[in-house]
Amino acid sequence: LQEQLIQAQKMESVGRLAGGVAHDFNNMLSAILGHCELAMGKLSAQHPLFSNLQHIRTAAERSADLTRQLLAFARRQPIAPKVLDINTTVAGMLQMLERLIGEDIHLVWQPGNVGQVRIDPSQLDQILINLCVNARDAIRDTGTVTIETKTVTIDQQQDGNHCEAVPGAYIMLSVSDDGYGMDAAALSHLFEPFYTTKEIGKGTGLGLAMVYGIVQQNKGLITVESEPGQGTALQIYLPCHEACAGQPVEDAVNQVAVTT
Ligand code: ADP
């Protein structure tokens, strides 16, 4: 509980910081970008200063990207939950996800016999995109990313990775990779806002903090299994919508724990 409180406070302060700064910062970046484009328009591509301007533009674009993510993180956007079939939603995103992870990485889709969940569709998109981007980035050259769904029961009140789950039927959405994996130290910081091991401009450390927030909002649970050099699997458990609570259950989760 203490850990949850600390995480909530961190998210709150990041939110406030982002809300206060990102908006104005984005306006200033627009001015930098605008003037940069103007200057580039006045110089020929051969001019010695042209490539400097290109670098300024790239850096400003990356910064704008970062502030956009911060704004999305800070904004308490009204959510519009819908009852949806998780397999249909994932299937509808596969083409986009394939493009996202690139042609050197194999995407495997293993739909289970699952029912419906009640969630804002854009939140589900965010979860999948974030998990797939991380899986892609963990794979050096070639590898496999597997997306899987399953119905599971959680039969006792338990702590997952920071989130608590009440007993009941859940739909598990898992994204696993055979990438470089994580050690115990990395796992302990995984959901912290701004924790990233990626190079500047590539990672913000907000992806999983965002996923965590979404899952918590939807009364779900997250678990992680990871082995350095072997790969990582992140499982998201979302409560089954009432209509499917009586469906046959494929598996039971007796122990939900973080393993390294
Ligand atoms: P970002 O992707 O911007 O770094 P995230 O919050 O999504 O932010 O991830 C935080 C960090 O967790 C990553 O920088 C990486 O070190 C680690 N991580 C997340 N997913 C994986 C994965 N599938 N395999 C290995 N490391 C991961």
Image (cartoon, rainbow, N blue to C red):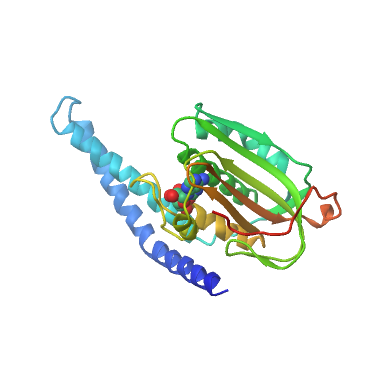
Which percent across, then down, holds residue 161? 58, 61
Relative to residue 259, is residue 198 drawn left or right? left
Which percent across, then down, holds residue 171? 73, 51
Which percent across, then down, holds residue 183? 47, 52
Pick the front one: 67 or 103: 103
Residue lying at 29% horizontally and 53% vertically, measured from the top left: 28
Relative to residue 152, is residue 1 drawn left or right? left
Q: How many numbered circles does the render carry?
A: 0
Q: Quadrant of the C terminus?
A: bottom right
Q: Quadrant of residue 86?
A: top right
Which percent across, then down, holds residue 203? 40, 48
Relative to residue 83, is residue 109 drawn left or right? left
Residue lying at the far left of the rendered structure: 48
Whether 189 is drawn above or below 228: the answer is below
Whether 51 is drawn above or below 31: the answer is above
Q: Is residue 33 visible?
A: yes
Q: Is residue 82 visible?
A: no
Whether 68 is drawn above or below 109: the answer is below
Pick the front one: 98 or 142: 142
Residue lying at 49% horizontally and 38% vertically, measured from the top left: 136
Q: Quadrant of the N terminus?
A: bottom right
Residue lying at 61% horizontally and 62% vertically, measured from the top left: 216
Whether 223 is drawn above or below 7: the answer is above
Relative to residue 206, is residue 40 drawn left or right? left
